[in-house]
């Protein structure tokens, strides 16, 4: 523990800006993944343990697409869209078969998919780390905000993720499809009786969730290196975010993802060894004081 | 036979033990003995988890915590003191049980999903403590320096044969005790809570107290499994308390059968055997394991033993 260093950091604006930026990056990427987890849980009542795999595959697909086309925008789109498709297929081929059966059976299937695709990645892309370079448009000198260093790419990432968060929130609140999705979260049988094709709806929700994870993976690829098994740690963290924010709540996911990101950003200075422990303590405290999470309804 | 289930179970356990102990005298095979030693640790771990998952309907994602705690407590006691091995093992199990009691007191009142996540959070907290408390636990390198394998009752635990015998005896006795617990009125109460907790509550059962007992007992037996694991690797590693390890136990339970007492043991054996066989042929162990799990999950829709019992009904569990 190094509270002096933390105090010294908080006293200088440069350090605050730098750490806050890195915290926001972590938080925003986490939000994109956790939003999918919470959306899928809210509507389908399924805890998707394979969500980290979507994130990982999104990154790898983007890597390949970038090498093939040399266009960063195409790479990100490819990562997101391919994972949306993958999500639909995953739901139809596997998860759809075990609705209503034991929760552990769903867990088992997700785990199998995680194992399989970790190895598929090893076979296709090799076990070594891959680095996806920064897109050339962003290879410019960093911005200086209040003395802190902010690479423009980071600013762009935060902006894109924030845009997605807003679109998702508005879409769920005001569009017809968003309202249908929220209705499905409350009572799918009733919705089905009213003539909505819930099978299709479930598949689409899974696709949206998968696409968000793929997008996060593709966006993160230039900042973090790609490796098989990279989905593992983000999965656990996105669960923490989901639980703290309230399962099924997008707003909760946003708030708690940013919170976790900032705890990470500043925790690395104050408690370099125990940042993870800090986050788990927050999670335990939330579960005890407010089991439904910050923004959740009671299950 | 039906009238004396305890006697029947004891007979089965005794016969199994005699067979397992006799094998090395007929044929020595290092691989087989290793397998049984690892299986004994894993079987205790998975079966104790099933006391929660299968019997009580409490899905704990953090059971690895107690497995790891048992291993670390045992390893550290053996390294730092001169206590005899059974005493150190007992201390480790008691410490694990006490920790399970404390953690359980916080967790057991939460409903299913939240219970799963809070146990996971406690386990990960424990894991980060192991990683960051380097002076005591050795951090991510694990507990090094080896665990002194002092002899007990003429057992020389440095010898593989004696270790094999020791682990087999401990595991069979542990499983027998667990079996007894799960067949007792207490075990019946657990299943009643699983099937209908409201009705159980109306009958005057204090739900949280019974659940807390189950959680504590399960933690203690997971700790015993951890002791055996520490004995086998002569050390303790943070991976023992990491969440993939809890996952392994859950999959052993699911694969073997959640409603059969011996299901988790079978599941653990399948997982370990798959590991041994597949890693010999290919480095893509996860790929093969994943496909096998998918085949089981989608084909049988339940654990192997549960499936067999449904296919040939009339046999006792």
Image (cartoon, coloured by chain):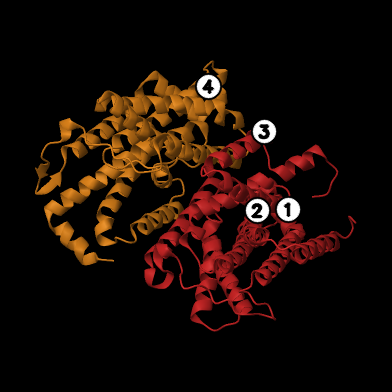
| Position in image of residue B96 (x %, y %) | 56, 68
Among the two numbered marks 3 and 2 on one chain, the one whose residue lies closer to the N terminus:
2
Tag 3 residue: B299
Please give the name of the residue rendered at 28% of the width and 23% of the height, measured from the top-left corner: A69
Drawn colour of chain B?
Answer: red
The label shown at residue B50 is 2
Q: Do callouts 4 and 1 mark residues in contact (Cβ within 8 Å)?
A: no
> Are the residues under marks 2 and 4 on the same chain?
no
Image quadrant assignment for residue A199: top right
Q: Is residue A149 visible?
A: yes
> Are the residues under marks 4 and 1 on the same chain?
no
Position above or below: B233 against A253 = below
Q: Do callouts 2 and 4 mark residues in contact (Cβ within 8 Å)?
A: no
Tag 4 residue: A198
| Position in image of residue B225 (x %, y %) | 61, 63
| Position in image of residue B13 (x %, y %) | 79, 62
Pointer 2 indicates a residue of which chain? B
Task: Please count the marks in the image.
Answer: 4
Gap in angstroms between the C-alphas marked 4 and 3: 25 Å
């Amino acid at each position: 523990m190094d509270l002096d260093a933390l105090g010294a950091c908080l006293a200088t604006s440069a350090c605050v800006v730098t750490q806050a930026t890195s915290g926001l990056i972590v938080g925003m990427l986490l939000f994109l993944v956790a939003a999918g987890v919470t959306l899928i849980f809210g509507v389908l009542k399924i805890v998707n343990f394979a969500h980290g795999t979507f994130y990982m595959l999104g990154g790898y697909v983007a890597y390949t697409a970038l090498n093939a086309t040399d266009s960063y925008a195409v790479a990100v789109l490819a990562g997101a869209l391919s994972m949306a498709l993958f999500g639909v297929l995953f739901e139809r081929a596997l998860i759809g078969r075990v609705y209503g059966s034991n929760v552990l059976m769903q867990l088992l299937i997700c785990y199998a998919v995680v194992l399989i695709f970790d190895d598929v990645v090893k076979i296709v892309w090799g076990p070594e780390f891959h680095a996806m370079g920064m897109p050339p448009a962003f290879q410019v000198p960093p911005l200086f905000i209040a003395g802190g260093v902010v690479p423009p790419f980071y600013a762009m990432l935060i902006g894109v993720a924030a845009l997605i968060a807003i679109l998702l929130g508005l879409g769920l609140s005001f569009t017809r499809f968003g309202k249908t999705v929220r209705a499905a979260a409350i009572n799918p049988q009733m919705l089905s009786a009213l003539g909505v094709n819930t099978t299709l709806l479930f598949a689409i929700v899974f696709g949206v969730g998968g696409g968000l994870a793929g997008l996060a993976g593709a966006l993160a690829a230039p900042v973090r290196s790609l490796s098989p098994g990279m989905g593992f740690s983000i999965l656990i963290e996105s669960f923490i975010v989901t639980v703290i924010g309230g399962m099924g709540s997008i707003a909760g996911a946003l708030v708690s993802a940013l919170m976790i990101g900032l705890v990470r950003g500043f925790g690395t200075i104050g408690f370099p060894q125990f940042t993870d422990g800090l986050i788990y303590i927050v999670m335990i405290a939330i579960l005890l004081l407010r089991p439904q999470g910050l923004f959740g309804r009671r299950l | 036979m039906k009238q004396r289930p305890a006697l029947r179970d004891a007979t089965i356990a005794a016969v199994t033990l005699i067979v397992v102990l006799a094998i090395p005298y007929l044929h020595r095979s290092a691989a087989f003995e290793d397998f049984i030693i690892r299986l004994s640790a894993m079987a205790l771990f998975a079966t104790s988890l099933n006391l929660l998952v299968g019997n009580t309907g409490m899905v704990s994602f953090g059971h690895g915590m107690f497995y790891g705690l048992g291993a670390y407590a045992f390893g550290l006691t053996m390294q730092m003191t001169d206590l005899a091995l059974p005493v150190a093992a007992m201390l480790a199990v008691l410490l694990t049980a006490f920790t399970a009691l404390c953690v359980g007191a916080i967790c057991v009142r939460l409903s299913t999903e939240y219970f799963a996540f809070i146990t996971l959070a406690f386990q990960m907290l424990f894991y980060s403590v192991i990683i960051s408390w380097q002076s005591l636990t050795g951090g991510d390198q694990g507990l090094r320096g080896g665990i002194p394998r002092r002899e007990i009752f003429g057992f020389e635990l440095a010898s593989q044969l004696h270790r094999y015998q020791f682990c087999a005896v401990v595991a069979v006795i542990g499983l027998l005790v667990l079996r007894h617990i799960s067949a007792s009125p207490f075990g019946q109460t657990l299943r009643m809570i699983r099937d209908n907790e409201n009705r159980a509550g109306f009958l005057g059962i204090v739900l949280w107290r019974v659940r807390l007992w189950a959680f504590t007992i399960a933690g203690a037996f997971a700790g015993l499994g951890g002791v055996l694991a520490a004995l086998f690797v002569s050390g303790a590693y943070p991976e023992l308390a990491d969440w993939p390890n809890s996952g392994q136990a859950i999959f052993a339970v699911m694969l073997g059968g959640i409603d059969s007492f011996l299901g988790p043991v079978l599941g653990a054996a399948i997982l370990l055997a798959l590991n041994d066989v597949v890693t010999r042929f290919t480095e893509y162990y996860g790929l093969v394991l994943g496909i096998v799990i998918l085949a089981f999950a989608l084909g049988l829709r339940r654990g192997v033993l549960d499936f067999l019992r449904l296919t040939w009904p009339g046999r006792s569990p």
